[in-house]
Image (tube, rainbow, N blue to C red):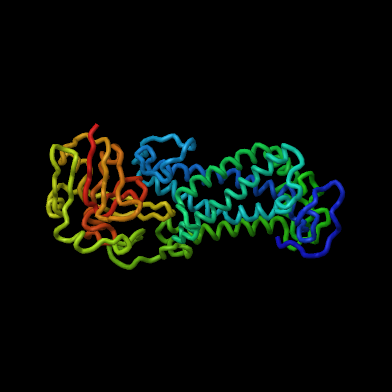
Amino acid sequence: MTPSCKTGPSVRAGRHNALMGPDKPRWRSPLRGVWLTSVLGAVLLATLPIVTLTGLLSYIAYGPRLGQAIPADVGWLKLPTFDWPTDPAWLYQSTQGLHVGLGLVLIPVVLAKLWSVIPKLFIWPPATSPAQLLERLSLLMLVGGVLFEIVTGVLNIQYDYLFGFSFYTAHYFGAWVFIAGFVVHIALKIPRMRAGLRSMSLREVLRTDRRGTRPQAPDADGLAPADPDPPTISRRGALALVGGGALLMAVLTAGQTIGGFTRQAALLLPRGRSYGDGPNAFQINRTARAAGITAADTGAAWRLTLRGGPRPLVLSRAALEALPQHTARLPIACVEGWSTAQTWSGVRLRDLAALAGVPAPASALVSSVERRGAFTRARLQANQIRHPDSLLALRVNGAELSLDHGHPARVIVPALPGVHNTKWVATIDFEGR
């Protein structure tokens, strides 16, 4: 798919002038044409809405109705909100894993699609009619939006905040720029995509080797070169290259969500593939040291304060251990796409609510010993408190929580975003109906 650098003919009459347009020497690959562009476009048409929808679901899972989604003020771009479900327990693990995983897998497809239309990106003048102007604006929003979402998303996964602004805010508004461009572009281009898919037979393409590969005839969109070079790869080879790149990306990243033996192949995991030995040997998003947690904060003097009833109730860790304990195997999933399922033991949140004097809680504000950071507290909705597997966990996999995993106590709730499973819990304020 490497373009040729041979010298070609001058721009033909009746075509757009171009800075590096379709008639310029460097854009002479015979693979370019409406068929290849339409095939790649069809793949993205089927998959990018899934990435978009799961991303918007992640925003809803953060609880905008409870005032804790980022960004909080989105103006007229508000999403319909609802009580985020607690069943199945793996709901957020699957939606966010799909959002990040599929987004990474599609990077080779997006790049191939941009390669297939790159001559169109440099035409000048960019538009000669109102319809063309609308098309160019949608293209700018589409290309700019998808590249912005990919770059900021990958940097967030790697914890490289080079951009100097809030990832959550930028990614949310960037998504809406992409959505607007995507919808308009599809409305304008889908008839041409259908025609492009019919312009060649997929079966014939898959049967044709490099020597039999022929360029498509020049088209109204100017995708096919007027003076193509000989092919250096067949169309089926190009599809295999793109598909192989997507498959390789899946192999190198999917283990962070799927786990098990697939984690050994996930070489691109930012948190590594091994976390040592023992019951606490699993992923840590924020260490106690990074959070500024000291021994004085979590030692023998630590107390849990429950509020909401007639008067506050203060409990030591020994008092919590003396209460009825419950064990559940639950996943914890992070916005970066990683997840892990562990066996947690502790006191049910609904039992703590009843103990505090709020037998039918509408919400609960959980606050951490941690003093700084965007997620030092989280508000839980009623179904998250009442679920029988929602715990103030004291142990994991049969052992006491390590300090990095939230000792002396942490929240673990089914299907809740990881950052809202507050560690180093200091107070829980229950609110009745």
Residue at coordinates 49% horizontally, 49% vertically from top-left? Answer: 170
Give the x, y percent position of residue 414. Answer: 32, 45
Please identify the quarter of the rendering in which residue 298 is found: bottom left
- Eyeballing the image, is 110 above or below 380? below
Residue at coordinates 47% horizontally, 42% vertically from top-left? Answer: 56
Give the x, y percent position of residue 8. Answer: 84, 60
Q: Count all numbered tags in the image, as a single digit.
A: 0
Residue 331 visible from this viewpoint: no
Q: Nearer the viewer, residue 142 or 72?
A: 72
Residue 229 visible from this viewpoint: yes
Residue at coordinates 86% horizontally, 57% vertically from top-left? Answer: 10
Give the x, y percent position of residue 188. Answer: 68, 38
Q: Residue furthest top?
A: 433
Q: Is residue 16 left or right of residue 39?
A: right
Q: Is residue 372 left or right of residue 119?
A: left
Image quarter of the C terminus: top left
Image quarter of the N terminus: bottom right
Give the x, y percent position of residue 15. Answer: 82, 48
- Eyeballing the image, is 307 above or below 375? above
Residue at coordinates 40% horizontally, 46% vertically from top-left? Answer: 92
Q: Nearer the viewer, residue 309 or 371?
A: 371
Q: Is residue 232 left or right of residue 87?
A: right
Please identify the quarter of the rendering in which residue 134 is found: top right
Q: Is residue 146 left or right of residue 414?
A: right
- Eyeballing the image, is 125 above or below 284? above
